[in-house]
């Protein structure tokens, strides 16, 4: 049976409760019986789903939103010190808990799988959540995106397994003590928090070091950063390492990936036997995510053939190559990709799934710091599209950096031979795309910001 409610969490207040990570923790606490409250900057489907679980959700931030009897205030690294609810918490002496500590407390007493990596965390965590649920193991899970089937990013289950997306961006994944840790890849990102690759390797090494004695690390045998991390691990006496990938030396070896439209058939060699299963999203990188999920489940003692069959029930995560609709022969697909590696992987996946289609991309850069460091690589990735529209940078939690604009990406894309149109006014994008798209085209909205809102608007314009 899953454990109950941590005492300090029985009346939590979340600042930014609508965020992907925060809302998941709030949902699990509400399902465990906590009196959950919080605030967010705007109304959303997430806010409504929390209210349906009994949570109180305020729109906007104000000191009065924090109840005097709150037992803690939960924050993420994005919450600024001058937030009025955080200031009020200090006045009342209410403990402030970081999101990662709240999530760690929910994992206590359970067999945790923590999924880490610069890319692919949400998909891999989701695959595991779906497969374990399909097998009747009733896991708890906290994911950075909503599953297509259940339509939620978190759930309290009665089983003894907890699957969690482990965020490296602010080092918060170092708080967890998993039985199984997955490292999909290690690359330079989150430039506001990491000054070098050495800092990132150190952070991941600390994460791996928190695996419980006798636990397992599942790690890529192919990706250069993951291979380097494996070579840096020092104390391996209490840790079992299982590698996966195309490498002939991988413990779980990818034998073959066969594209089948918007799905893939994957064959792996595991313990001397070939095992074939279906992945319901296109692209080699998603197939490798599924193999990582398979290896992690086997590490928990789940029969490989059962898990492989259950992985075939995964139907996707919102914003991970999610088909938003089709009008007049034009398909509109949404991608969360915002790092050059992710962008390249999703664009190549779409090329493989629809080789004869023209690929039109609406890209919104995410964060000034990321654009400053990786803008050239983002532009180079866009050269894989037939034509692209590039929006202004979505700032999220950051203040502008002088001289850093989308022009960095546009110049790099044009240098790489890409057809790029800059658009400053996001509201005009549907009209721009309508003037570009023809029957048979694929339109991909791409980025981690509010570019996702454009999908339905583009479809509506195409229908006219």
Image: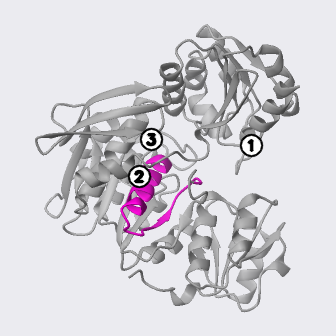
Name which of mark 1 and mark 2 comes first in the sequence: 2
Q: Residue visible at 47% across and 86% down?
A: 4
Which residue is labeled 3 in the image? Answer: 196
From the viewer's side, name the closer residue of 456 and 184: 456
User: Quick check: can you spot residue 152?
Assistant: yes
Side of 64 where 349 appears, left or right: left
> In which quadrant of the rendered view does residue 416 lie?
top right
- Provide residue 193's location: percent of width, then percent of height: 54, 50
- Provide residue 181's location: percent of width, then percent of height: 32, 57
Q: Residue furthest top?
A: 417
Q: Which residues are magenta?
A: 121-146
Q: Is residue 126 magenta?
A: yes
Q: In what element is the residue under mark 2?
A: strand
Alpha carbon distance from label 1 to label 2: 24 Å
In this rendering, the answer to whether 15 lies above or below 66 is above
Q: Residue visible at 62% across and 16% down?
A: 412
From the viewer's side, name the closer residue of 125 and 373: 125
Count of picture labels = 3
Label drawn at residue 116: 2
Foreground mark, 1 or 3, reads: 1
Q: Residues within 10 Å of mark 3 (few under 14, many from 20)?
A: few
Alpha carbon distance from label 2 to label 3: 18 Å
Which residue is labeled 1 in the image? Answer: 450
Side of 228 where 192 appears, left or right: right
Side of 363 where 182 appears, left or right: left
> In which quadrant of the rendered view does residue 221 lie?
top left
Name which of mark 1 and mark 3 comes first in the sequence: 3
């Amino acid at each position: 049976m899953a454990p109950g409610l941590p005492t300090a969490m029985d009346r939590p207040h979340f600042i930014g409760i609508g965020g992907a990570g925060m809302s998941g923790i709030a949902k699990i606490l509400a399902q465990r019986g906590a009196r959950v409250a919080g605030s967010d900057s705007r109304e959303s489907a997430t806010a409504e789903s929390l209210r349906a679980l009994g949570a109180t959700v305020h729109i906007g931030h104000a000191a009065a939103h924090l109840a005097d009897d709150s037992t803690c205030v939960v924050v993420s690294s994005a919450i600024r010190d001058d937030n009025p609810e955080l200031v009020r918490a200090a006045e009342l002496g209410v403990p402030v808990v970081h999101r990662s500590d709240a999530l760690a407390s929910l994992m206590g007493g359970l067999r945790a799988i923590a999924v880490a990596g610069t890319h692919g965390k949400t998909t891999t965590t989701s695959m595991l959540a779906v497969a374990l649920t399909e097998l009747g193991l009733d896991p708890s899970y906290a994911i950075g995106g909503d599953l297509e089937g259940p339509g939620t990013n978190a759930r309290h289950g009665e089983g003894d397994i907890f699957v969690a997306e482990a965020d490296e961006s602010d080092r918060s994944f170092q708080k967890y003590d998993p039985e199984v840790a997955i490292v999909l890849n290690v690359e330079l990102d989150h430039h506001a928090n990491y000054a070098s690759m050495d800092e990132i390797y150190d952070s991941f090494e600390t994460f791996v070091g928190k695996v419980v004695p006798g636990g397992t690390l599942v790690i890529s045998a192919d990706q250069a950063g993951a291979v380097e991390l494996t070579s840096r691990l020092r104390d391996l006496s209490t840790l079992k390492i299982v590698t996966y990938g195309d490498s002939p030396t991988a413990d779980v070896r990818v034998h073959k990936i066969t594209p089948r439209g918007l799905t893939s058939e994957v064959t792996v060699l595991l313990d001397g036997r070939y095992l074939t299963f279906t992945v319901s999203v296109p692209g080699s990188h998603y197939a490798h995510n599924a193999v990582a999920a398979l290896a992690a489940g086997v590490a928990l003692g789940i029969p490989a053939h059962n898990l492989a069959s259950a992985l075939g029930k995964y139907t996707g995560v919102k914003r991970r190559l999610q088909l938003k609709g089709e009008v007049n022969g034009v398909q509109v697909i949404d991608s969360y990709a915002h790092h050059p590696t992710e962008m390249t992987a999703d664009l190549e996946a779409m090329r493989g799934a629809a080789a004869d289609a023209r690929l039109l991309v609406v890209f919104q850069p995410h964060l000034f710091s990321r654009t400053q460091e990786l803008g050239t690589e983002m532009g180079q990735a866009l050269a894989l599209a037939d034509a692209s529209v590039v929006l202004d940078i979505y700032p999220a939690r950051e203040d502008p950096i002088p001289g850093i604009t989308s022009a960095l990406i546009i110049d790099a894309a044009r240098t790489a031979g890409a057809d790029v149109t800059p658009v400053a006014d996001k509201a005009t994008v549907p009209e721009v795309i309508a003037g570009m798209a023809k029957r048979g085209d694929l339109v991909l909205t791409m980025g981690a910001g509010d570019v996702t809102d454009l999908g339905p608007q583009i479809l509506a314009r195409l229908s006219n």
